[in-house]
Amino acid sequence: MFSKNISFGSKRLLVPCQAALSQVQSNGLAAEATFEPGRPYKLHLLSEGPSNTLTVTRDEALKYYRDMQVIRRLETAAGNMYKEKLIRGFCHLYSGQEACAVGAKAAMQPQDSVITAYRAHGWTYMMGVPVLGVLGELTGRSSGCARGKGGSMHMYAENFYGGNGIVGAQVPLGAGIAFANKYKGNQGVCISLYGDGAANQGQLFEAFNMAQLWKLPCIFICENNGYGMGTSVERSSASTNYYTRGDFIPGIWVDGMDVLAVREATRFAADLCREGKGPFVMEYATYRYQGHSMSDPGTSYRSREEIQEVRQTRDPISGFKDRILNADLVTAEELKEIDLEVRQTVDDATKQAKVDPEVGMDDLAGDIYSLPIETKIRGVTSFDTINHKRIGRAVNFQ
């Protein structure tokens, strides 16, 4: 075990790390390295928590770095297109929260599923939708993952149930998905995400109660970015320890800016769920750099200095970059190549999303139902009907 001084913005941190000498490759780089969480876990109703040994291989490190960079750049592109009025309506960016989606996805198995709120672009990408599928959906184009008819808050993929616009409504739906997994006996775990702004919704506690009674394989995760719209958690919640809000359900607090700690804590909870010891309530302590949505400048209820301090001291991408560089897992040249490749990928998708066609009017009633009983869909009036059209398969209907 050794320690290295790691630059993290304007500060330097002493982070314990370990690279097994037997794992050093011929190119002089370590094949894997071991770290400790930057901030300790907090536990509720648990005698033991996730491991404090965070091991990552070189290939994993490169993948996590690339995925976080894709999400960051994708959201930057989305913000720019919104300002150009190429994206209309609601648009909630995930910038700053990348480690949550990347870390949790790394802990998942193929049969696991995810349902989240409206800040869904990063999760959509992590669940298998390409960059163009996200940006095309945002611009209302046929290349979008829902053919441009869902928009920012309604994106779907296999085992990914959206994007949901109603605050907190996805949480009981997540319990239902977990119930389906238990009924099928497929060892699947459902990750049901919500923000701190939804944490006081009554329907959450109803879902918690049912999940505990039925021992559902569900992980309820509060992505606590500090603000519900423009209201800080201290002003909105009598208790800000969201990981304890399950009361009778075990809970874990984890630093949501540490991709490896997120992965380890989520894997710990998922493994116990597979053993029939679910559900769990988790809290990812994270931060969003942008406003609640594109209509919110994000500086009327917090200072620019606060945002800048988080960028300099807690940014999930630069922090992870410093870690893996100082552990000799990767080289600066490799990361620079990834940066250039990601930029090109997002730039190409952005250009394509601007020129792809919209779907035709005959697609207006396309794929409303997977098994339609009535093939006539009501139009503007009951006398104006549209024929239901089946275009593609329902990705999560089996």
Image (tube, rainbow, N blue to C red):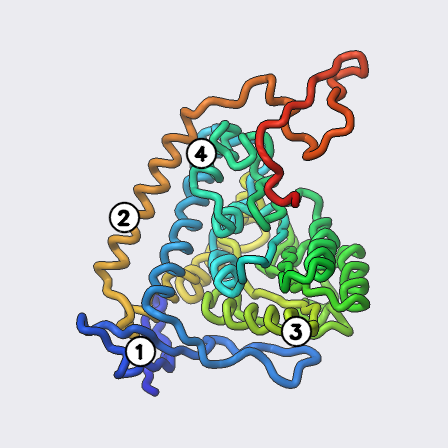
User: Mark 1 against mark 2, which lies toward the viewer?
Assistant: 2
In the depicted view, which residue is nearer to us: 227 or 62? Answer: 62
Q: Is 289 rendered above or below residue 278?
A: above
Residue 290: percent from left, percent from top: 50, 48
Find numbered disc 4 in the image and state the secondary structure of the residue it sits on: helix
Residues under labels 2 and 4: Cα distance? Answer: 20 Å
Find numbered disc 3 in the image and state the secondary structure of the residue it sits on: loop
The N terminus: image quadrant = bottom left
Which residue in the protein does label 2 denote? 340
Residues under labels 4 and 3: Cα distance? Answer: 45 Å
The mark that comes first in sequence, 1 or 4, is 1
Q: Is 204 rendered above or below residue 279?
A: above
- Which amino acid, mark 4? Met
Label 3: how many Cα within 10 Å (few below 14, some 14–19, many 20+): few
Q: Going 29% across and 73% down the picture, which residue do you hit?
A: 31
Q: Which mark is residue 5?
A: 1
Residue 24: percent from left, percent from top: 24, 77
Q: Going 64% across and 59% down the picture, which residue do you hit?
A: 190
Residues under labels 2 and 3: Cα distance? Answer: 43 Å
- Which amino acid, mark 3? Glu
Q: Which mark is residue 275?
A: 3
Q: Going 45% across and 45% down the picture, which residue do you hit?
A: 75
The C terminus: image quadrant = top right
Q: Going 37% across and 82% down the picture, which residue do you hit?
A: 16
Residues under labels 1 and 2: Cα distance? Answer: 27 Å
